[in-house]
Image (tube, rainbow, N blue to C red):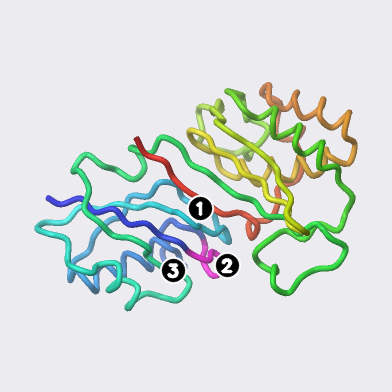
C-alpha cells in the first residue's frame, strides 16, 4: 500500500463544509470524485480538520491509501478535473504510518476582520465587516489569556458530541495591518465553532476593555455556552496550516 498526502486550499463559500454529505456539495465530495476519475477507483480521504460550511482553507491536509505507486503529476491531474474553488497545492507519498488527522500535532486558524466604517466589495465573503468600536489592546489581552490549557465549554455549541473540553493553546494573537484585523490561534485541537465563538466574544468584550478582559478570563474556566458572546460568521475563518512531527 502507498500512503499519499495532499495539501489543499479552497474557497469555502460554495461548500457545505468539508465532510461528504449526500446531495450536498462538499470539499471532500469534490476531491474524492476527482480522485475516482484520475485513479479509476474510489478512495476515502482522511483529513486534518473538518471545516464547517463557508469556512476557507489555506493549508488543509488530507491523506489516503492506494495499491501500487502514486500516479505522476497527481496534483496537476486533480486540478485539471476539479472545480476552480479547490486546488491541490502538493501531492506526495509519505510514510505508511502517516494519517492526516491522527498524525497532526497542532492546527492553526486565521480569522480576518475588516475594521472600518464602510464595507469592501473586495473583502465580501473574505472577512467579517466590523464597523463598530473596539480596543485593540483589549483584544490583545484576551488573546494572551488564551495561551495554555483551558476549559473551552463556553466556546462550543451546547448540543455537542465532544466529551473533552480542555484544549492546549500554543499561541494566540491579534494584529492589525491597515483596515484588516487578523486573529491567529494554534492549538493541539479545536472544537466545533470554537474559533468563531472566540472571535465573536472577544469583539464583544473589547467594547469594555477592563471589564471585558476580566469576564473573558472567567469564560476559560468551564463557563456554559450562554455566558460567551455571539458566533462570528464563517466567511472570515481560514484553516491556515497543520503541523506534524
Q: Earlier in the sequence, mark 3 or mark 1?
A: 1
Q: Is residue 151 left or right of residue 202?
A: left
Q: Earlier in the sequence, mark 2 or mark 1?
A: 2
* Rendering coords of residue 59 (x, y %): 45, 54
Please report the bounds of the magenta region as a residue range.
10-16
Which residue is under mark 3? 86
**Residue at far front of view:** 177
* Rendering coords of residue 35 (x, y %): 27, 67
Whether pointer 3 and pointer 1 mark residues with C-beta atoms closer than 8 Å, the reply is no
Q: Is residue 112 left or right of residue 132?
A: left
Q: Secondary structure at mark 3?
A: strand
Q: Earlier in the sequence, mark 3 or mark 2?
A: 2
Which residue is nearer to you in this view: 23 or 109?
109
Q: Residue 14 magenta-drawn?
A: yes
Q: Which mark is residue 13?
A: 2
Q: Is residue 194 left or right of residue 18?
A: right
Q: Marks 3/2: CA distance?
A: 11 Å
* Rendering coords of residue 23 (x, y %): 44, 69
Amino acid at each position: 500500500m502507498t500512503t499519499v498526502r495532499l495539501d489543499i486550499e479552497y474557497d469555502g463559500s460554495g461548500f457545505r463544509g468539508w465532510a461528504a454529505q449526500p446531495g450536498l456539495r462538499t470539499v471532500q465530495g469534490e476531491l474524492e470524485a476527482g480522485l475516482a476519475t484520475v485513479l479509476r477507483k474510489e478512495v476515502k480521504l482522511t483529513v486534518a480538520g473538518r471545516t464547517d460550511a463557508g469556512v476557507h482553507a489555506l493549508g488543509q491536509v488530507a491523506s489516503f491509501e492506494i495499491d501500487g505507486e502514486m500516479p505522476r503529476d497527481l496534483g496537476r491531474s486533480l486540478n485539471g478535473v476539479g472545480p476552480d474553488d479547490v486546488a491541490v497545492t502538493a501531492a506526495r507519498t509519505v510514510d505508511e504510518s502517516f494519517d492526516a488527522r491522527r498524525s497532526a500535532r497542532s492546527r492553526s486558524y486565521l480569522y480576518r476582520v475588516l475594521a472600518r466604517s464602510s464595507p469592501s466589495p473586495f473583502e465580501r465573503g473574505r472577512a467579517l465587516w466590523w464597523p463598530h468600536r473596539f480596543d485593540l489592546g483589549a483584544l490583545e489581552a484576551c488573546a494572551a489569556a488564551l495561551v495554555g490549557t483551558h476549559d473551552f465549554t463556553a466556546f462550543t455549541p451546547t448540543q455537542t458530541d465532544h466529551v473533552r473540553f480542555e484544549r492546549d493553546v500554543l499561541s494566540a494573537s491579534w494584529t492589525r495591518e491597515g483596515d484588516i484585523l487578523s486573529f491567529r490561534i494554534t492549538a493541539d485541537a479545536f472544537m466545533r465553532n470554537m474559533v468563531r465563538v472566540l472571535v465573536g466574544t472577544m469583539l464583544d468584550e473589547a467594547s469594555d476593555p477592563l471589564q471585558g478582559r476580566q469576564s473573558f478570563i472567567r469564560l476559560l474556566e468551564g463557563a456554559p455556552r450562554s455566558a460567551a458572546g455571539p458566533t462570528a460568521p464563517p466567511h472570515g475563518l481560514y484553516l491556515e496550516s497543520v503541523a506534524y512531527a
